[in-house]
Amino acid sequence: MIFRDRPFAVWGLPLVTLLLALLVLGTDASGVATRLRGLLFDNLASARPRTYQDTRAYGHPVKVLEADPSAIARYGAWPWPHATLAGMVDALKNRGAYLVVFVGTIDRPDAAAARNLTALVPPGPAYDAARQALEHLPSPDTALTTAFAGVKSVTGFTLDGDAPPANVALKSQVAWSGSRDPMPRVPATSRAAGSIEAVQAASTGLGALNLAVDADGKVRRMPLVFRFGDKALPSLDAEVLRLAEDKPVLTVKSDDGQSGLLGGPPGVLGVETARGLLATTPDGSIWMAYAGANPARMISAAALMDGTLPPDAVRDAIVYIGAPDAMIQTPLGPRPVAEVHAEAAEDLLTGSMLRRPPSAGQAELLCLALFGLGCSLLIAKFGVRWAAGYVLLVTAIIGTVSWRLYTGNGVLFDGVGLAAGLWAVWATGAAARTVEILWVRSSLKRAFTDVLPPRVIDQIARRQGSMKLEGESRTVTYLACGVRGFAELASSFRGDPAAFTRLIQRVLEPLMNEALAHGGAIDKLTADGFTAFWNAPLDDPEHAVHACEAAMGMMEAIARTNEIITHERRSDGVALDPVEIGVGLSSGPAIAGGFRVHGRTAYSVNGDCAVVAVKVQQLSGQYGPAVVVTEDTRKAAERGFAFLEVDFIEVENHDGPVKLYAMLGNPVMRASPKFRALATFHVHIFQSMRDREWHKARALIAQCRTLSGASQKLYDLHLARIAYFEANPPGEDWDGAFRPILQ
């Protein structure tokens, strides 16, 4: 089972985080989903904005009347007097403009009206004529409403204002088609504030000015419909679309509750136009495809009034007039509100608005659930690194899909929220896994700090279950190391036991460090040394090579130690002699395992190779060289070291005799002419002894004694054995191994 060997925190907490991520993104708690989604969409819009195009080909070009510096210098700062606006509307009408759109409410009579000056005329009959003249002068408000005649116009009102509903007199209705009312998902309000009655009466259309501002203050969507009590109201942009198509009613289509992967409450599917259905969100808004500021969209107010515009500059145009300092944040930066509405008109006329189908959000949550579950399973089964690679791959795929859908189809797919949720799942699993590893590593260090190498402890902590205390069969290389002449050395320190203890620690500590550094595990501490093994508890395919490398490192370590201690003296003033060590190595099958008792964990290997290694270490002193290995170890590590056959003996309780080899160096030594000559002589020596050619063996030994690197102790041993065999001839079935001769 996947979770059997993992604590709950490692796989359970990521699943809890996944559920929380689904809940937060699905409910948009605290606007988290909106902010993440906005971050992605803003980057997409910045990387690939909509290509600006003149919408004249779609019936009406869209223009914005610009309060340029020349106009500001002439008419002053915004808001301009109503008489000035009336003159501009007349100029637009005379140049063939189709629709004039005021982005804002004209909610107060013009303060510059002549009748407002009557209060400044002194009282008395002498000034009655002046008062009457002022009262009969044309009103700028009248001039503005008069200018509306002969050109279509749209003015706005603000929902949730302070004025009563009676302040708004709609010019059109919003109808819907379908089997179920889509309006419950449309934003609702109960109060509104509009322009003065004269302006409303003169306007061809009235629309709500409210924008859909996200939690971060940016406008990414533009509403088309609102609910006002039991009525449906059009937005400013919806009224522009209705009048651009010369329709009496704006019709929205219901999705009949069939939106999304699993359906849901009914909402708005789209707006019906002459060119077909324009897709909207269920609340009746469109996702803006911003092209950004463009001079071709702008009309200079000063040039309009001067008559210096090109003849067809505003012919059949939809012209927006709004406050130049009324700014709003967009994905492409701050923009005047009038330009934002103009871009919405371009989107509606060309049908180039972005799309985010209702199923997109559900698809994102489904992907997060599936990918998040996969991440949790990977963490539980293979660990944090595999899961990180998986999340990186999924994130790259999500980013690619988001980009392709946006650039190819204008579809908004929220890859950031999905990726953020997925990374949160991974981070939770990684944190839980890290805590688990630290705790297990701490426990292992307490139990095995002087037994297993640090990297092995770390790997066991990361891969729990790799140390099988219940026991398993393994092929291991076992090493036994001991101080030669230990009893005599201890006897010489009889008067200073503390110094002897310090000496043994100085000798053994670097030797044990070499074993640990080469991946060995310390098995037992003996009176004169220690034992170690390789290829347990973790796999080590090169266990024999690593054990031999450790043995070579021990030779170098004892040499360094001897350089120091030979310059020291015992408490009685006698100089310390160099310490000799012997190392025995044997490879073979063993049972590896352990047990826990009294809060401590013991781990060891047991097998014939362990017994043989200890025996070889005890015999190594009679051969001269410090490191002696069995034939199994020699075969497994031969490519990396120089081995010289030194004996063929019978070991108690072992099946068959054992060939022993002295390890003399690395491959460089093995390739040297001197070593090859010595190895050749040894082959002939042991062959002569197996053939009972004692005189020939003596002659070969005599020649070997003169070679560089020869061990005189080894040859003394074999000369003594030749003498023994001459006195006690072996039987006819003798296999060449040395063993006591039974009488």
Image: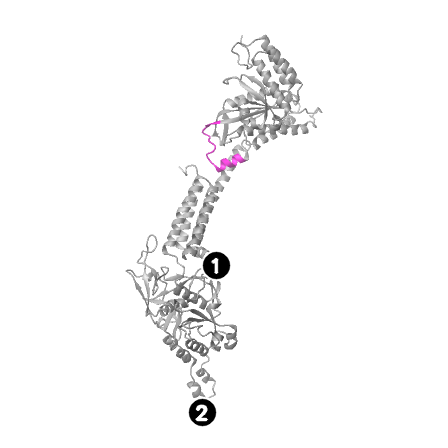
Q: Nearer the viewer, residue 80 or 356?
A: 356
Is 543 contained in the magenta span? no
Quadrant location of the N terminus in the rendered image: top left
Q: Position of residue 650 (x, y in %)?
A: 54, 16
Does residue 326 sit above or below 279 in this rendering?
below
Which residue was labeled with disc 2? 125
Q: Of all residues shown, which one is farthest toward the right?
A: 573
Q: Within the image, what quadrant is residue 191 found in? A: bottom left
Q: Within the image, what quadrant is residue 322 found in? A: bottom left
Name which of mark 1 and mark 2 comes first in the sequence.
Answer: 1
Q: Which residues are magenta?
A: 455-474
Describe the element under mark 2 as helix, strand or loop: helix
Describe the element under mark 1 as helix, strand or loop: helix
Observer able to see residue 374: yes
Is 459 contained in the magenta span? yes
Which residue was labeled with disc 1? 46
User: Which label lies toward us, 1 or 2?
Assistant: 1
Q: How many marks?
A: 2
Q: CA distance from mark 1 to mark 2?
A: 69 Å
Which amino acid type is shown beneath numbered disc 1? Ser
Q: Position of residue 315 (x, y in %)?
A: 42, 73
| Neighbours of disc 1 within 10 Å: few (<14), some (14-19), many (20+) | some
Does residue 413 sit above or below 80 in this rendering?
above
Q: Position of residue 708 (x, y in %)?
A: 66, 22
